[in-house]
């Protein structure tokens, strides 16, 4: 039969019943295989099937397949050879075969042929037996006997697939695939699953007993500020001055001589500098701050040693970048002291020199502009209470807006297109909406441009108004007492000044011109004769004079 060794065992032999053709019992010696009158002996063999343990496949299907094969062989062959105890081979004709799973040898008189149970009893969860050794499973189940459920989306975080598309989660997780931490059930705001900790400083619970902190904080419950070094380059938005060190979230630790949020305020001392002062104020000067002298009338200098020989003392110089061409004085860091803002034409930047007190200034900090910054103005254009820088970039035909980031520092510029060679810029509310607008003189295209403030420090595209040749300087003042600012422009190439009256809503009428001397280069508008009407004063570059135009 070609069955593996040990798969078939003869468990016992007994004689079959001898039934004659007339229904009478025969003598045992007359028992015949085919129940005919032919002589012969019929024996009943008890056969036990075993599945050898040394076979490589030990699954239920392999067992069933082997037993089915052996049963089929018994049903199909006509004779078999049986090895006797003495080793001899006995040829036996097969009459019929019966299958009895309970081990009973049965009764050969009631022959129905061999019967084999299929795999239906082994297929679980509605699976169907496709063959003797194959289950076809219903949707949602898999494996040999359809005993394993299928979850289309894998169960996460140690969850277990316990029925089709159903995850059973551990205590710390929930959701269809156990992907959501238990952070909210019966817990206070921003607490974790089992409420064992509370996330502080706006931290958020994003996992079981796990806080995700905002940028300024760290630690298990976000209770530790992000310490930073290198003068606040980590998560700090402020800059510690005068050798102060950022030691916490937006927190400066100052040296002994300084105080304030960013260490910008000297530790005041009295008694002529006996506190923290190492200098001595001369000529009746008084130490009023850290190493700072307030000089008596007629004296100046760091220790009041420079006498004034006239109305002003000798100049003190402070380094800028290349070709400083225009400057403005304004308090950019809200310390009630005027700082210097200068346009460095040749190095394409603006420099900010912070007032250090007593008329002295710190080294400049530069901010990049476009090509050839020519004119600069300081106005709060985004209504945040801090002065912003507006610069006319002569060489790149733009105006740049640098918003004040606080403490006298500025963001990178945002640029807006102008016409050719913007040479002068003024920032005034020209349309009465309480937002300052930009007016620029475009030297190379013979016009002035008006950029209306759109809010939050942004501006609309310019509207241009024709001037005479080479407008080089512009002023914006209400010259006709209608409470609307008008434009006054010095036309360098045509030797006149132009007046463009405000027509309302930020639009302007065509200019009216007034003659000057040669090459008017700069213009100012003020009431010089006390008649409550503004007059025009102009510097005539080519004729070496100034002109005054009195308003009639």
Image (tube, rainbow, N blue to C red):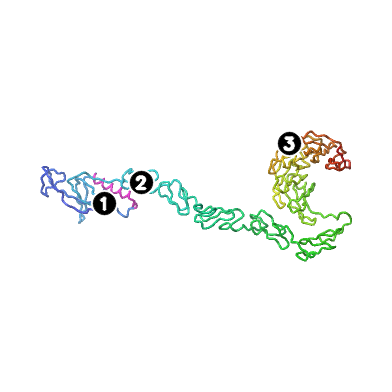
Q: Position of residue 265 (x, y in %)?
A: 73, 58
The image quarter in which residue 498 lies: top right
Magenta-drawn stretch, dominant element (helix, strand or loop): helix
Residue 307: give x, y in percent of width and height: 87, 59
Residues marked 3 and 2 touching at CB (< 8 Å): no
Residue pointed to by mark 2: 125
Mark 1 neighbour class, 10 Å CA radius: few under 14, some 14 to 19, many 20 or more: some
Which of pointers 1 and 3 lies earlier in the amino acid sequence? Answer: 1
Q: Quadrant of the C terminus?
A: top right
Marks 1 and 3, Cα distance to the nearest angstrom? 107 Å
Residue in the foreground of this view, choosing between 335 and 33: 335
Q: Residues within 10 Å of mark 3 (few under 14, many from 20)?
A: few
The residue at the point 30 percent across, 54 percent down is 52
Residue 59 among magenta residues: yes
Q: Nearer the viewer, residue 390 or 264?
A: 264
Outermost residue toward the bottom in this view: 274
Pointer 1: what residue?
49
Image: magenta residue range: 56-75
Where is 435 relative to 47, above or below?
Answer: above
The disc, 1 or 2, on the residue closer to the chain's N-terminal end is: 1
Residue 509 location (% of width, % of height): 78, 34
Residue 353 part of the magenta segment: no
Q: Residues at badges 1 and 2 in contact (C-beta under 8 Å)?
A: no
- Residue beneath label 3, please? 505
Name the outermost residue toward the top. 510
Residue 381 versus residue 403: which sits nearer the camera?
Answer: 381
Distance between the alpha carbons at the discs numbered 1 and 2: 29 Å
Closer mark to the observer between disc 1 and disc 2: 2
The crowding category of the residue bearing disc 2, from other C-alpha atoms within 10 Å (few below 14, some 14 to 19, many at least 20), is some
């Amino acid at each position: 039969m070609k069955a593996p060794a040990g798969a078939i065992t003869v468990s016992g032999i007994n004689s079959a019943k001898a039934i004659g053709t007339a229904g009478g019992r025969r003598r045992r010696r007359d028992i015949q295989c085919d129940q005919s009158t032919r002589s012969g002996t019929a024996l009943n063999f008890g056969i036990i099937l075993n599945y050898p343990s040394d076979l490589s496949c030990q699954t239920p299907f392999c067992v069933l397949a082997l037993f089915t094969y052996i049963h089929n062989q018994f049903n199909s062959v006509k004779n078999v050879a049986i090895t006797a105890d003495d080793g001899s081979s006995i040829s036996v004709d097969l009459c019929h075969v019966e299958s009895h799973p309970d081990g009973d040898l049965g009764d050969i008189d009631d022959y129905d042929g061999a019967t084999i149970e299929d795999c239906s009893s082994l297929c679980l969860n509605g699976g169907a037996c496709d063959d003797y050794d194959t289950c076809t499973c219903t949707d949602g189940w898999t494996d040999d006997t359809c005993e394993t459920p299928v979850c289309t989306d894998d169960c996460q975080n140690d969850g277990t697939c316990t029925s089709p598309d159903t995850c059973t989660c551990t205590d710390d997780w929930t959701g269809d695939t156990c992907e959501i931490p238990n952070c909210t059930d019966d817990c206070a705001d921003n607490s974790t699953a089992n409420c064992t900790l509370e996330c502080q400083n706006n931290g958020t619970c994003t996992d079981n007993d796990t806080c995700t902190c905002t940028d300024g904080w760290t630690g298990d419950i976000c209770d530790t500020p992000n310490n930073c070094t290198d003068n606040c380059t980590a998560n700090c938005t402020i800059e510690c001055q005068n050798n102060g060190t950022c030691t916490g979230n937006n927190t400066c630790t100052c040296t002994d001589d300084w105080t304030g949020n960013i260490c910008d305020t000297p530790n005041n001392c009295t008694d002529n500098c006996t506190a923290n002062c190492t200098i001595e104020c001369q000529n009746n000067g008084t130490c009023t701050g850290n190493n700072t002298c307030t000089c008596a009338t007629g004296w100046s200098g760091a220790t009041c040693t420079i006498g004034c020989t006239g109305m002003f003392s000798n100049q003190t110089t402070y380094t800028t970048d290349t070709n400083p061409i225009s400057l403005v004085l304004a308090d950019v860091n809200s310390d009630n002291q005027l700082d210097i803002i200068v346009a460095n034409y040749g190095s394409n930047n603006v420099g900010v020199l912070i007032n250090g007190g007593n008329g002295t200034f710190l080294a400049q900090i530069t901010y990049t502009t476009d090509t050839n910054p020519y004119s600069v103005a300081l106005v709060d254009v985004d209504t945040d209470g801090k002065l912003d820088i507006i610069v006319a970039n002569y060489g790149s035909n733009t105006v740049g807006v640098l918003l004040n980031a606080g403490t006298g520092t500025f963001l990178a510029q945002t640029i807006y297109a102008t016409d050719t060679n913007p040479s002068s810029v003024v920032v005034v509310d020209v349309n009465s909406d309480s937002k300052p607008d930009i007016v620029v003189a475009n030297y190379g295209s013979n016009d002035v441009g008006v950029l209306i403030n759109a809010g939050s420090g942004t501006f609309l595209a310019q509207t241009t108004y024709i001037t005479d040749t080479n407008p080089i300087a512009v002023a914006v003042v209400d010259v006709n007492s209608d409470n609307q600012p008008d434009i006054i422009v010095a036309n360098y190439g045509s030797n006149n000044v132009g007046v463009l009256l405000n027509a309302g809503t930020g639009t302007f009428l065509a200019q009216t011109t007034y003659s000057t001397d040669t090459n008017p280069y700069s213009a100012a508008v003020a009431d010089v004769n006390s008649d409550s009407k503004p007059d025009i004063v102009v510097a005539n570059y080519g004729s070496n004079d100034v002109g005054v135009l009195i308003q009639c």
